[in-house]
Structures are given as structure tokens and as C-alpha cells.
């Protein structure tokens, strides 16, 4: 049986988030509209989903949904690339798309190179290059 892995983000403004990910960062999707109820993006090995935050909270618990106030939720998403140059390119794409750059590209103590940005809903993304990792033919990291 095939397994479909999905990362879902609850978003406050579907139009803004769709413009950020599809139009700004170039994430691939079949969605052509500007304000769908749900949108899925194709990524290597997973599907990336935007879902309205209030509906996601309701889905978790309809009688007592979790608070959705702004703030760091203790979760970051990682986007692993194949070179230091690709870290810089990705951060520039994010910057042009309207991301807040939380950490400019730089060397990391463990020998890699990374940066952080926050998307329009405040989700933090680490863009990282690890010189010790390889990618397979499906663009998945091999440990």
C-alpha cells in the first residue's frame, strides 16, 4: 500500500499564503484559484497542505478547539537543499515573496549552512544545506 504523507499548516489568510507559497516560492500545485478551501502542493516525498487555521482547530476538537493566537508554537519546518548557494537562493525567493527573514544564511557549528524565515502566518522554515547528506533519485535525503 502506498502511503501519502501530508504536512498541514493552518493559515489565517488563504489568498496571502497561496500567493506566498505558489506564486512567490514556486511550490507546485494544480490549484489555479486564489481562495480555495484547501490546497495541496507537491514536494519531494510529501504533500504540503494549506488549511484554514480555524477549521484545523475545529478539526482537532470541535467543542474545545486549541487557541490559535499568534506566537511560536515550537515547530519549525525544514527545507533541505543541495548547496550553500541554494540556501541563499531560497532565502532570496522567500524575501521577495514577503517572508520575514529571521536568520540570514550562515555557517553552522556542525559544518552545514542554513537560514530561517517566517511565512505570512509566522511559521518558521529552516533552509539548510548539510554537506554530509546525499539525495536519492526521488530527491529524498539519504542518511
Image (cartoon, rainbow, N blue to C red):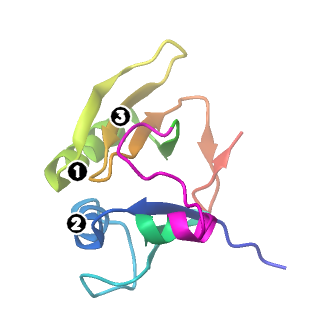
Magenta stretch containing residue 59, yes or no?
Answer: yes
* Residue located 30% across and 50% down the image: 119
Pick the residue in front: 128 or 134: 128
- Residue wearing tag 3: 116
Q: Which residues are magenta?
A: 57-73
Q: Position of residue 117 (x, y in %)?
A: 31, 39
Q: Position of residue 28 (x, y in %)?
A: 38, 73
**Quadrant of residue 13 in the image?**
bottom left
Magenta stretch containing residue 139, yes or no?
Answer: no
Residue 42 visible to the viewer: no
Q: Quadrant of the C terminus?
A: top right
**Marks 3/2: CA–CA distance:** 20 Å
Helix, strand or loop under label 2? helix
Q: Which disc is residue 93 wearing?
A: 1
Q: Disc 1, disc 3: CB below 8 Å?
A: no
Q: Position of residue 39 (x, y in %)?
A: 42, 78
Helix, strand or loop under label 3? strand
Amino acid at each position: 500500500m502506498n502511503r501519502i504523507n501530508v504536512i498541514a499548516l493552518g493559515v489565517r489568510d488563504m489568498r496571502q499564503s497561496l500567493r506566498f507559497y505558489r506564486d512567490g516560492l514556486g511550490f507546485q500545485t494544480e490549484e489555479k484559484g486564489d481562495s480555495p478551501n484547501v490546497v495541496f502542493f507537491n514536494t519531494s516525498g510529501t504533500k504540503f497542505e494549506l488549511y484554514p487555521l480555524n477549521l484545523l482547530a475545529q478539526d482537532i476538537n470541535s467543542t474545545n478547539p486549541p487557541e490559535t493566537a499568534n506566537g511560536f508554537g515550537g515547530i519549525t519546518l525544514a527545507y533541505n537543499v543541495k548547496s550553500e548557494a541554494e540556501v541563499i537562493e531560497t532565502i532570496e525567493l522567500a524575501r521577495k515573496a514577503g517572508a520575514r527573514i529571521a536568520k540570514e544564511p550562515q555557517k553552522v557549528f556542525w559544518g552545514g549552512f542554513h537560514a530561517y524565515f517566517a511565512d505570512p502566518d509566522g511559521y518558521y522554515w529552516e533552509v539548510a544545506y548539510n554537506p554530509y547528506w546525499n539525495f536519492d533519485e526521488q530527491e529524498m535525503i539519504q542518511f
